[in-house]
Image (cartoon, rainbow, N blue to C red):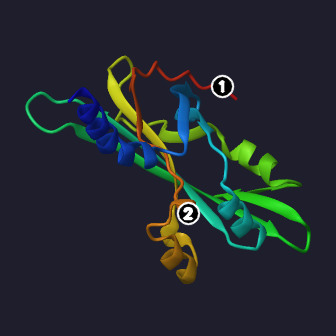
């Protein structure tokens, strides 16, 4: 009977283990700077061979970092104060034989895919609450959440159909949540 119970438990947990996150979010922090509150974190992941091949053959991968800041309320649902997303474009240019990582209007070129992924894995100084925005009060406790995911809706249509339900095209982290108590913003230097 014990053996049957063990097998049933393993069978129940197997789908959860198979669909576990491929990206691990480590060391997330909400920090005060002169520009406002910024997020810093490390993402631990590797592109699987299918995704590496797709990038090398010219498919642009769009990876999206999502951030949320909520305030707990005892009388109603938690209040979502901040929701931000930032998209990174990872591509390969055959003419220059360079991998390119772009976000906003900034572009960086790399000789190897692993160098580009290494830079992508280090999120630094992402302004999520601008100075002057009164939504966050220093010293109060908030719940912050961060994740990184491959946006499959940005893939070319044939790849979207192939990616549907295909584990090789799945790349995402679970939401990493932590308690954040923002310190006061530094006083800007007089110029």
Q: Position of residue 9 (x, y in %)?
A: 28, 36
Q: Is residue 50 above or below residue 70?
A: below
Q: Position of residue 55 (x, y in %)?
A: 72, 66
Q: Position of residue 157 (x, y in %)?
A: 53, 82
Along the viewing direction, whichever of 112 and 48 lies nearer the viewer: 48
Quadrant, the N terminus = top left
For marks 2 and 1, give the one nearer the viewer: 2
Q: Position of residue 176 (x, y in %)?
A: 43, 35
Quick check: 35 left or right of 118? left
User: Left or right of 20: which side holds 48?
Assistant: right
Left or right: residue 129 versus residue 48 is: left
The image quarter in which residue 34 lies: top right
Q: Residue at x 44, y 67 (%)?
A: 165
Q: Rate crowding at label 2 as few (under 14), some (14 to 19) or many (20 or more) other CA atoms within 10 Å.
A: some
Residue pointed to by mark 1: 190
Q: Residue at x 66, y 62 (%)?
A: 51
Res. 169 mark: 2
Using the image as rendered, state which of residue 140 and residue 48 is in the foreground.
48
Task: Estimate the spatial distance between the alpha carbons at disc 2 and disc 1, rounded to whole Å.
Answer: 50 Å
Q: Nearer the viewer, residue 118 or 188?
A: 118
Whichever of labels 2 and 1 marks the residue nearer the N terminus, that label is 2
Where residue 130 is drawn, which disc sits there? none
């Amino acid at each position: 009977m014990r053996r049957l119970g063990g097998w049933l438990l393993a069978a129940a947990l197997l789908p959860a283990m198979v669909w576990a996150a491929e990206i691990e979010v480590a060391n997330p922090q909400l920090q005060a700077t002169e520009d406002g509150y910024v997020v810093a974190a490390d993402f631990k992941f590797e592109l699987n061979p299918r995704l590496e091949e797709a990038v090398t053959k010219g498919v642009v991968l769009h990876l999206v970092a999502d951030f949320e800041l909520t305030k707990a309320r005892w009388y109603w649902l938690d209040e979502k104060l901040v929701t931000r997303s930032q998209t990174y474009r990872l591509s390969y240019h055959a003419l220059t034989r360079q991998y390119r990582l772009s976000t906003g209007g900034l572009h960086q070129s790399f000789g190897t895919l692993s160098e580009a992924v290494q830079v992508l894995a280090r999120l630094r100084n992402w302004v999520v609450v601008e100075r002057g925005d009164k939504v966050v009060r220093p010293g109060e406790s908030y719940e912050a959440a961060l994740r990184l995911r491959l946006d499959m809706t940005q893939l070319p249509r044939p790849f979207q159909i192939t990616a549907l339900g295909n584990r090789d095209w799945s790349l995402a982290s679970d939401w990493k949540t932590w308690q954040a108590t923002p310190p006061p913003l530094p006083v800007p230097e007089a110029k």
